[in-house]
Image (tube, rainbow, N blue to C red):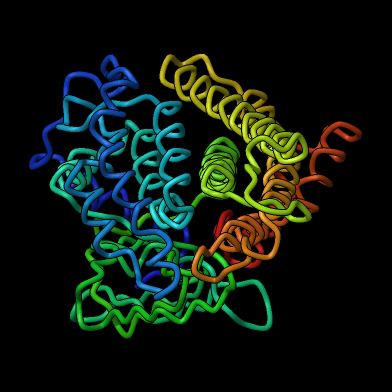
Amino acid sequence: MSADPSGLRRTANDWISMTTDTIEKPESTSTLSTPPTYADLAARFRPVFDRIRDTAVERETDRRLAHDEVSWLREAGFGRVRVPVEYGGLGASLSQLVELLVELGEADANLPQLWRGHHAFVESRLNSPERLDQKKWFDLIVGGAVIGNAQAERGPETASSALLEETPDGWRLTGEKYYSTGSIYADWIWTGAVYGGSQAGLAVRADQPAVTRLDDWDGFGQRLTGSGTTRFERAVIEPEHIVFANFDDERTQANITSFYQTVLLAALAGTGRAVLRDAVDFVRGRTRTFGVLGASRPADDPLVQRVIGKLSSLSATADALVRDVARALESNFDRFHAGEWSQDDYDETLITVFRAQQQVIATVLEATTLLFEVGGASATSSARQLDRHWRNARTLSSHNPAILRERAIGDYLLNGTRPVSAWSKRAEKAGTSAEG
């Protein structure tokens, strides 16, 4: 067993080429088919989103994991939104996917995040048209497979201690991950490990006895995302499910970082919409106002109207920023598949994402606090769970800290430092993935 990284990559390529005869490729994988209209997608998914919204407070109160809700989305085809039509998917554009994620976030902010790893996996396949495993994975996803993500580890330093081993019985994975968002709902888990000094990406079947998934995420928000511990105890790994990472590919790193962050921003924008919805519903149902004797109608109070107007503006701002980011990502996708991309495109898009992050976080957090100005103490009733909006928004905002992104923007403008470069070098040295 060689520990030479270049030898590992040759071995991985050999595994891929061995499957060539059994994988049928379409005539062209360079572009997606004409996407459906958003009205088509909305007609398919909004009834499911409505069901998810209607059970959100109960689910939050009981801390009930969203297994049923994931199944509803799976059955509606949410996992194959971006899979090309020629593979049996819906063929939606990237902007359409992001808009769906915002709507889903309005129903329950947990859901976009727990699907984050799945859609990132699909994007990684779409952005690697030369890979011969596209049809295999797209067939599984169209058949209903859900992909989870488990990369980060707890420990005294940022590094990967999970080990991939080649044994007489085949490849085995041993290690423990945390922040395993979505993995508790998944059929497959995308994770990382070290083999002979090289970092590997792995797809692991989640239902094997050697894989244990724990709901021990103890964050005060996004409590139903399944972001807890995943243990691999000599888990079986098929050789064709191993990919050795290339930290020199800044396009790929910038693209996946942009996409991962955009999903979180979509969940935040959805939270902003939910805050506005709940504030309007709360006010419309009230018949008395603080400091006013007898029956009154808070909806006629100019101060309450002003708060609702402000919440509407904050939500619209978050929506607009997320749409801008989605268009930038989509432009890169189209340019890449047309062979017209440049590294500068990806650098600029990542900076666009970082800028949007600063404003979307501030905007939505302001809204989640301002919400309570429309109802007095009754708005704090635990039966309403209105505080979940702040808790979820604050937790979403803590992923990939905004202060680091703000610094990256400044370094890029002042010194021309590409936003991925410094992180990629640190990640390669530590043996970590570029996005947890």
Query: Residue at 37% of width from left, 55% of height from top?
Result: 243
- The answer to which image quadrant residue 47 occupies is top left
Residue 402, x across and y down, in percent: 74, 51
Residue 72, x across and y down, in percent: 22, 51
Query: Residue at 44% of width from left, 71% of height from top?
Result: 195
Can residue 267 be seen in this snapshot? no
Q: Is residue 120 above or below residue 157?
A: above
- The answer to which image quadrant residue 56 occupies is bottom left
Q: Is residue 134 above or below residue 330?
A: below
Residue at the limit of the structure toward the right, as seen here: 414
Q: Is residue 365 left or right of 336 when viewed as pictured?
A: right
Q: Nearer the viewer, residue 335 or 120?
A: 120
Q: Is residue 185 left or right of 153 when viewed as pictured?
A: left
Question: Image quadrant for the C terminus?
Answer: bottom right
Question: Image quadrant for the N terminus?
Answer: bottom left
Residue at the limit of the structure toward the front, as seen here: 294
Q: Nearer the viewer, residue 423 or 72?
A: 72
Residue 106, x across and y down, in percent: 47, 44
Query: Residue at 31% of width from left, 48% of height from top?
Result: 13
- The answer to which image quadrant residue 166 occupies is bottom left
Q: Nearer the viewer, residue 383 or 185?
A: 383
Q: Is residue 79 left or right of 312 when viewed as pictured?
A: left
Residue 192, x across and y down, in percent: 44, 65
Residue at the limit of the structure toward the left, as seen here: 22
Q: Is residue 112 above or below residue 4?
A: above
Number of numbered callouts drawn: 0
Can residue 51 be seen in this snapshot? yes
